[in-house]
Amino acid sequence: MKVYKGVSWIADKLSVAPSERDAKWMHHRKDEVWLSSALRKRYPLSMKAIFRGKRDVKFKHNKTVIITTHPRPYEQWIYDCLKVDIAIVCKQNEINAAEKRFQSEKSVALKRKSNLSKILSIFSSSLAIMHKKGMVDAVIGRGSYFDVNGYPSEKDDVDLILLKEEKPKYAGSYKIINKKITEFISNSKGDFGVNLINFDEKTIKKPSNKHMPMFSLILIMNGYKGLGTLYERYVLEEGVPVKIPGLKASDAKRIARKFASDLQRDTREIQLRENKLTVFPKNTNNS
């Protein structure tokens, strides 16, 4: 019996989507590739119908039985993906023990998830100041701590999307706002860690206590078009508003929904033909 955490796979209609074996950037452990392939066969496309479900998954694969939490939306590189936070693989004669272990892992994860309000309170004063200073207009949560089928592990970040509704009328405003956020958080006194995701992921603040939470932030500003993937729409339409003093949850939802409605249609096939996108990440060696 083996326990896996955070197993993702490509679930995309894009005709050039690579196999799990070729999508090497997706997998932190080599022995996960076959599992991702099995889950991809079971759930080949990311669809709204999947997101509405909550049932755990159990199915046979060759001589093994696979038990997982319900798939949730995810994204890697330019692809719509699906992800399960907990997966257990066992032999037929280990099913009872595997199901007990599975429920135990879920309970631990849900207990961790129940502390979300306490975790956010560590960062809320910083968010409030950024909102007051006009760096952000709203914040929504995504990922295992917020998704209905999310089961966070000990090492998971708390993923937040910062929304800036009114785009400043000056050149390079996206980089400038990112720089302001970086400088503000880097100099903040709270004991927490922050990764800022721009075109890559950069740690801008480290916690002094390794047990303190890490937050991952991504800034989206007015005019954001995205790739038009289902995941992007899902996050902006279903993302959970994070409480900020001076901002109503209804206003945060309105801003997020507006961003969702402004997303362009899926243009990845066209951009690939015009060499504006690549099938693989540029820094990944795929042969």
Image (cartoon, rainbow, N blue to C red):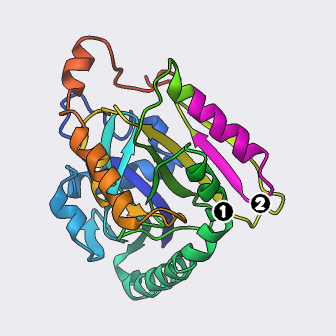
To which residue does mark 2 refer? 190
Position of 123 with respect to 50 (left or right) is right
| 34 and 127: which is toward the camera | 127
Residue 16, visible in the rendered structure: yes
Name the element at disc 2.
loop
Position of 6 with respect to 274 (left or right) is right
Residue 10, visible in the rendered structure: no
In the image, what residue type sits under mark 2? Gly
Label 2 crowd (10 A; few <14 / some 14-19 / many >=20): some
Residue with the most extreme right position: 208
Residue shown at 40% from the left, 26% from the top = 280
Q: CA distance from mark 1 to mark 2?
A: 9 Å
Q: Is residue 187 magenta?
A: yes
Name the element at disc 1.
helix
Q: Nearer the viewer, mark 1 or mark 2?
A: 1
Q: Is residue 240 above or below residue 29?
A: below
| 67 and 116: which is toward the camera | 116
Q: Is residue 160 above or below residue 65?
A: above
The image quarter containing residue 274 is top left
Please report contact status of discs 1 and 2: CB closer than 8 Å, yes or no: yes
Over which residues does the magenta segment extend? Answer: 176-196
To which residue does mark 1 refer? 125
In the image, what residue type sits under mark 1? Ser
Where is residue 108? Give x, y as percent.
55, 81
